[in-house]
Amino acid sequence: MNADIPLFVGVDVGGTNIKVGIVDDEGRTVAQTKFPTIADKEPSHSIEKAKQSIEKLLEESGRSLDDVAAVGLGTPGPMDIEAGVILTPSNLPAWRNAPVRDLLAKATGKPVTYANDAAAASFGEYWIGSGRQFGSLVLITLGTGVGGGIIVNDFSIDGAHSHGAEIGHVTIDTSESARRCPCGTMGHLEAYASATAVVARCSEALSGGAKSLLTAEMGEASPLSALMISQAANQGDELSLSIIDETAKYLGRGIATLAHVIDPEVFILGGAMDFGGSASHVGRQFIDGVIAETKKIVFPVLAEKLVVRYAELGGDAGFVGAAGLARTEYLKRKNA
């Protein structure tokens, strides 16, 4: 009831769930919910469910659509942001070439700002998260793959073809033995620093006879995961610690390239694979390793000014950032 009007809605579409949040003018979450993504049906079904969720959240909060100025929508790519169309999402087969921005605008009767889901999460961290005191940032999300976003002075760097900030596809290894990225190209950062890559490298070491606490934990019921590696590292497992240290070096090489190209004020690490984050010894060791490797490669002034920290908003970053991008566009229209 103390929310600052106008309100903004953020809709964060994932392959499994869609998160919907009502955010006030200061970035505070008024209400939020989520529901399963209807991935095998055309997006109009999920859009209608999103509309119903928005109306219910507003009613429960004592507000109405009249209090909402704009809506932000984040989806996975590939996408045509300018046209408002999601193109060929691998985890949403029935959404191919769907005009999702306009569908949501029609359903809600509000202007909709469309963004890549990682860009939306980046803006969330920029607005009220780890990057709130900075004018520019790069968010790197570490999970099944490596994603991210770039924010500079309230502006998301989406690129001329809606494929900007594809951080996972920065090349860090040009050798003949470079690892293959899921996209098919050799040597990309995602092939080395994603959770998938961490598990692959650890599995190879175990198959080669490396001793580890993980040997006793693995089985058909408990396949190896990045979380298991992180937990073993926290127990002092040498193999797990070495895999994580190696990952920090790979990520540092990717960050060095981004630092020379973008020179942001801060790099923020998000996603599910944070090895416990700043609350964990292993998490702190990981980020220290990232910083150390980056400083070996970048120009001295960049090394001196380098800031790397963990994200703060967790799973809320997507809908908060989508709402924040909608707010930015609303203010531009209002002040034009």
Image: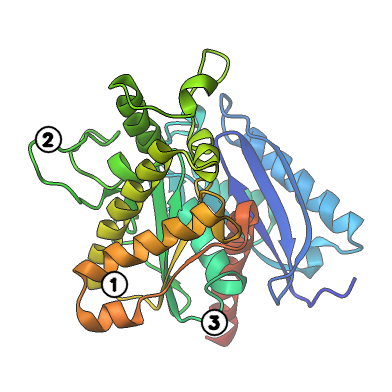
Is residue 243 in view? yes
Q: Which residue is mark 2?
A: 177
Q: Nearer the viewer, residue 3 or 137?
A: 137
Of the image marks 1 and 3, the number of the one nearer the N terminus: 3
Under tag 3, what secondary structure? loop
Which residue type carries mark 3? Gln
Percent of width and height locating residue 220: 52, 12
Q: Residue at x 29, y 72 (%)?
A: 262
The residue furthest top is 220
CB under 8 Å between discs 3 and 2: no
Give the structural element (helix, strand or loop) at label 2. Answer: loop
Task: Write the residue at 51% across / 55% down.
Answer: 283
Quick check: can you spot residue 114?
no
**Real-space CA distance between mark 1 and mark 2, rounded to the nearest whole angstrom:** 29 Å
Q: Which label's residue is closer to the chain start, 3 or 2?
A: 3
Q: Position of residue 318 (x, y in %)?
A: 58, 55
Res 77 → quadrant:
top left
Q: Mark 1 — residue?
A: 262
x and y percentages locating residue 269 in the rendered image: 46, 59
How many discs appear? 3
- In the image, 111 versus 62, the foreground residue is 62
What residue did someone put label 3 on? Answer: 133
Instruction: Count residues near mark 2 (Cα–Cα under 10 Å), then give few for <14, some for 14-19, many for 20+.
Output: few
Give neighbour class at mark 1: few <14, some 14-19, many 20+ (Cα, 10 Å): some
Three-letter amino acid code at the position of disc 1: Ile
Question: Which residue is found at the position 68% from the left and 71% from the top?
Answer: 27
Q: Residue at x 54, y 45 (%)?
A: 234
